[in-house]
Image (cartoon, coloured by chain):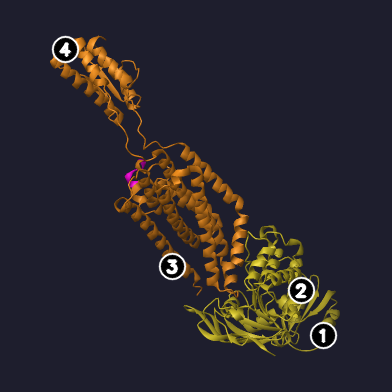
C-alpha cells in the first residue's frame, strides 16, 4: 500500500521535557489511523509537528513522498485539518465561514460553491447555512468546524478530537461523515481518547504515551496484547463476600470486581470460563440475571501496557 | 481576494456600530464648530466696575464717574466691605474705585487726592486701571494749565473723546480658519477612534489563535494573507480620511481650497497613516474583542483630551502639555493651531509645520517597528 505519511525518529523537546520521543510510524492510503493516548501523551505535538506548526528537534516527516516544511504549499493543498478547538469567524454565517476556509485552497468560485454544498451535505448543516456561529449548538458548531476543514476535498485529513462535548445525534452524524470521507478515498488520522470511536472507525491504531509509540496495529492485533482474554459480567443481587473470594481462586481469573450488584470477572486466558462459572452459580444456588461476555477493550490493552487507564 | 471579501463581510456585519460611531462623531464635531471660536477676532471689552463715591456728585467728580460709566459696566453692590470682597472673590466685579471725600476740591487745588482701588488683578481689572489712569493723567495736565473747572472738564472730554481708528491689515479669514482648525482638531478623535476600532475589530477576528492556526496550515502563503489584510485595512483608513476631507469641503467651503486647507488635509493624511500604524500595533497587543471599546476610549479620547483636540491647547496646564509631547496627536493638533494664524508661507514659517509632520512620521515608524517585534514574537510557535 502507498505510504501517505512517513514519520521517522521524530523528537520534540521543550527544555527538559521530551514531548515526543523518537517516534516513527507510517500512514497508508485510504486508511483511518487512530492516534490513541491519554491527555499529554504527545498526540497533538505529533500532529502539529507533522503539519509544520511546530519545529521539531530531530527526525524527518514525509507527506505524499515529499519532505514537509512550512512552505510546502503543494503538499498543504491536499491536507485538511479539523482541530479540537472550534475555529470560526463569529461575524460570518455558516456558509461564509466554509467559503473563507475553502477559499484558502480553491480559488475558482464555481468549484468552491459546489465543494461547499458537498461539505454542508456531508455534515448535515443544510438547514443552518445562514446561521451565525452564536446561533448554533455545540454539536452543530463541531459539524461546521469539520465542514470548514474538509470542504476543499483533501486527500489527507487530520481530525483532532472532533467529537469532544458533542450530543449523541451530532456524534453519530460526525462519525457517519468521517466514514463517507474514507469511502470517498481520503486518508484520515483520527485523534481521540474515546475508545469506542476508534473501534468503530479505525483500521489501524497507534497507542502513544509519554511521546512514545507503545503499540500499533489493527484492533485485533492490539487486543491480542491485552493480558485479559475476556470479561464476564453478571447481575447478582447481594452476593456474599465468601463467594467472591472463591471465584477469585478460579483458574485464569485475573480480577473480580463487585459493584452495584454487578459482578465483573476478568480472565487472563483459557476456554470454557463461562461454563465453569455458570456451573458454580448453579451449585451455590445463586440467582443471577443479564450474564454476558465482553471482549477486551483498547483501555484494557492500554492498562496492560502501562498499568494505567487511558483517561487517567 | 478571499481575505478582502471576508474583510468586507466583517465590516458589513459591524456596519451599524460603525455608522453610529461616525454619526456621533459628526454630530459632536458639528456642535464643536458651531460654538465658533472667536480667539482670533477683535472685540470690545468692558470691565465690570464698582464706584464708591464719597464726594459730591458734581464738577470734575461727576465727569470722572460719567467717563468710567461710559467705558465699563457699572455694577451695583451695596457699600458694605464684606459684600464688596465677596463680589471680588466671585469675579462679579473686576475693579472697585473709591472716590474720597473732597476729591473735587483737593484736585482743583492741586493737592493730588488719592483714589483707592481694589482689583481682581486680571486683564479686565487692568483695562479698568488703564482707563482710570488715562483720565487722571489728562485731567492733571489740563488742571495745571487751566483755571476754570468747566474749561478743564471740556478739554478733558475733548481729548478723551478722540478715537484712533485701528485697521486690521491682515487678509486672513480668521473666523473660517478657526473653524478649519476646530474641524481638523476634532478629526484627531474621529480618525483615531475610527481606525483603532475598525482595525482592531477586523484583525482580532483574523488573528484569533485558532483561526490563525487553521490559516497557516492552508495552501495560501500566510505572508500573502497578511499583506492582503494590510492593504484592506490601509484602504479602510484611506476611505475614512477621504470621508473627513470631503466632509470638511462640504462644511467649510472655499477656505479648504486655500493653502491653509491644503496643509490641513496633508497633515490629516500623515496623521491617518500614524493612526493606522498605531491601530495595527494595538490589534497585535489585544487578545479580546471585548477590550476594543475600552482601548478606543483610552487611546482616542485620552490623547484628544491631553493634546487639546476638544479644548484649546493654551488652556491646558504645562504638565499636561509636557505629557502630550509623547503623543502623535499633539504634533498633529499643533500644526492645525499654527495654521490658524499663519499668513505668510515660506520655508521659515513652514519649518515648525514640517518638523511636526516629521515627528508624526517618526511615531509611525516607531509603531511599525514595535508591531513587527510583537508580531514575530507571537509567530514563534516553538
Q: Quadrant of residue B365?
A: bottom left
Q: Foreground: A32 or A269?
A: A32
| Mark 4, residue position | B108
Q: Is residue B153 magenta?
A: no
Q: Is residue B95 above or below residue B24?
A: above
| Mark 2, residue position | A176
Mark in front: 4 vs 1: 4
Tell if the residue under mark 4 belongs to the same chain as the one under mark 1: no
Q: Foreground: A298 or B270?
A: B270
- Please give the letter of the chain rendered in yellow: A
Q: Earlier in the sequence, mark 3 or mark 4?
A: 4
Mark in front: 3 vs 4: 4
Q: Please report, as a chain letter, where disc 2 is located.
A: A
CA–CA distance in space, label 3 to label 2: 46 Å
CA–CA distance in space, label 3 to label 1: 73 Å
Mark in front: 3 vs 2: 3
Tell if the residue under mark 4 belongs to the same chain as the one under mark 2: no
| Mark 1, residue position | A276
Residue at image point 73% right, 79% down: A182
CA–CA distance in space, label 4 to label 2: 118 Å
Q: Magenta region: which residues?
A: B315-319
SS at mark 2 in the image: helix
| Mark 3, residue position | B373
Residue at image point 34% right, 28% down: B44
Amino acid at each position: 500500500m502507498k505510504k501517505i505519511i512517513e514519520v521517522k525518529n521524530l523528537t520534540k523537546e521543550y527544555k527538559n521535557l521530551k514531548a515526543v520521543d523518537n517516534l516513527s510510524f507510517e500512514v497508508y492510503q485510504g486508511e483511518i489511523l487512530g492516534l490513541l493516548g491519554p491527555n499529554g501523551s504527545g498526540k497533538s505535538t505529533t500532529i502539529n509537528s507533522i503539519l509544520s506548526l511546530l519545529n521539531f528537534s530531530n527526525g524527518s516527516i514525509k507527506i505524499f513522498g515529499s519532505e514537509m516544511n512550512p512552505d510546502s504549499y503543494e503538499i498543504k493543498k491536499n491536507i485538511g485539518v479539523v482541530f479540537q478547538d472550534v475555529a470560526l469567524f463569529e461575524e460570518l454565517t455558516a456558509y461564509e465561514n466554509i467559503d473563507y476556509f475553502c477559499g484558502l485552497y480553491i480559488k475558482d468560485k464555481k468549484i468552491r460553491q459546489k465543494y461547499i454544498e458537498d461539505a454542508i451535505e456531508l455534515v448535515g448543516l443544510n438547514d443552518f447555512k445562514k446561521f451565525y456561529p452564536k446561533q448554533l449548538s455545540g454539536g452543530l458548531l463541531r459539524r461546521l468546524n469539520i465542514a470548514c476543514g474538509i470542504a476543499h476535498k483533501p486527500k489527507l485529513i487530520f481530525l483532532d478530537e472532533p467529537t469532544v462535548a458533542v450530543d449523541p445525534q451530532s456524534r453519530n452524524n460526525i462519525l457517519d461523515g468521517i466514514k463517507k470521507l474514507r469511502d470517498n478515498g481520503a486518508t484520515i488520522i483520527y485523534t481521540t481518547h474515546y475508545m469506542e470511536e476508534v473501534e468503530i472507525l479505525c483500521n489501524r491504531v497507534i497507542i502513544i504515551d509519554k511521546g512514545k509509540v507503545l503499540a500499533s496495529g489493527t484492533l485485533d492485533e492490539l487486543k491480542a496484547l491485552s493480558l485479559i482474554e475476556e470479561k464476564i459480567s453478571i447481575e447478582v443481587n447481594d452476593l456474599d463476600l465468601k463467594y467472591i473470594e472463591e471465584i477469585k481462586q478460579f483458574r485464569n481469573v485475573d480480577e473480580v470486581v463487585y459493584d452495584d450488584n454487578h459482578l465483573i470477572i476478568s480472565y487472563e486466558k483459557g476456554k470454557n470460563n463461562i461454563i465453569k462459572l455458570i456451573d458454580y452459580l448453579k451449585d451455590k444456588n445463586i440467582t443471577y440475571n443479564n450474564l454476558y461476555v465482553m471482549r477486551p477493550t483498547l483501555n484494557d490493552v492500554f492498562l496492560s501496557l502501562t498499568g494505567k487507564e487511558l483517561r487517567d | 481576494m478571499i481575505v478582502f471579501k471576508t474583510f468586507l463581510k466583517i465590516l458589513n456585519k459591524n456596519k451599524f456600530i460603525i455608522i453610529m460611531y461616525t454619526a456621533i462623531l459628526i454630530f459632536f464635531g458639528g456642535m464643536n464648530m458651531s460654538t465658533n471660536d472667536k480667539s482670533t477676532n477683535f472685540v470690545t471689552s468692558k470691565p465690570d466696575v464698582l464706584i464708591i463715591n464719597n464726594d459730591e456728585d458734581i464738577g470734575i467728580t461727576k465727569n470722572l464717574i460719567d467717563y468710567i460709566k461710559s467705558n465699563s459696566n457699572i455694577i451695583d453692590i451695596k457699600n458694605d466691605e464684606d459684600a464688596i470682597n465677596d463680589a471680588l472673590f466671585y469675579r462679579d466685579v473686576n475693579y472697585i474705585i473709591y472716590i474720597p471725600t473732597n476729591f473735587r476740591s483737593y484736585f482743583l487745588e492741586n493737592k493730588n487726592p488719592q483714589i483707592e482701588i481694589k482689583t481682581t488683578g486680571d486683564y479686565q481689572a487692568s483695562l479698568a486701571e488703564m482707563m482710570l489712569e488715562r483720565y487722571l493723567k489728562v485731567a492733571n495736565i489740563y488742571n495745571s494749565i487751566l483755571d476754570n473747572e468747566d474749561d478743564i472738564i471740556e478739554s478733558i472730554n475733548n481729548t478723551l473723546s478722540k478715537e484712533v481708528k485701528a485697521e486690521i491689515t491682515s487678509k486672513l479669514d480668521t473666523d473660517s480658519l478657526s473653524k478649519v482648525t476646530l474641524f481638523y482638531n476634532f478629526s484627531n478623535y474621529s480618525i483615531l477612534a475610527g481606525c483603532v476600532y475598525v482595525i482592531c475589530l477586523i484583525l482580532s477576528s483574523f488573528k484569533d489563535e485558532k483561526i490563525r492556526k487553521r490559516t497557516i496550515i492552508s495552501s495560501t502563503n500566510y505572508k500573502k494573507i497578511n499583506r492582503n489584510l494590510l492593504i484592506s485595512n490601509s484602504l479602510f483608513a484611506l476611505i475614512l480620511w477621504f470621508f473627513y476631507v470631503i466632509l470638511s469641503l462640504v462644511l467649510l467651503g472655499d477656505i479648504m481650497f486655500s493653502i491653509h486647507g491644503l496643509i490641513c488635509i496633508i497633515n490629516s493624511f500623515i496623521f491617518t497613516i500614524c493612526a493606522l500604524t498605531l491601530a495595527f500595533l494595538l490589534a497585535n497587543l489585544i487578545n479580546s474583542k471585548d477590550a476594543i471599546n475600552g482601548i478606543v476610549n483610552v487611546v482616542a479620547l485620552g490623547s484628544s483630551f491631553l493634546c487639546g483636540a476638544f479644548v484649546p491647547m493654551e488652556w491646558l496646564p504645562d504638565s499636561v502639555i509636557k505629557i502630550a509631547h509623547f503623543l502623535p496627536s499633539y504634533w498633529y493638533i499643533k500644526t492645525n493651531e499654527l495654521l490658524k494664524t499663519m499668513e505668510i508661507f515660506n520655508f521659515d514659517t513652514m519649518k515648525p509645520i514640517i518638523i511636526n509632520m516629521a515627528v508624526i512620521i517618526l511615531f509611525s515608524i516607531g509603531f511599525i517597528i514595535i508591531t513587527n517585534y510583537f508580531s514575530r514574537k507571537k509567530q514563534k510557535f516553538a
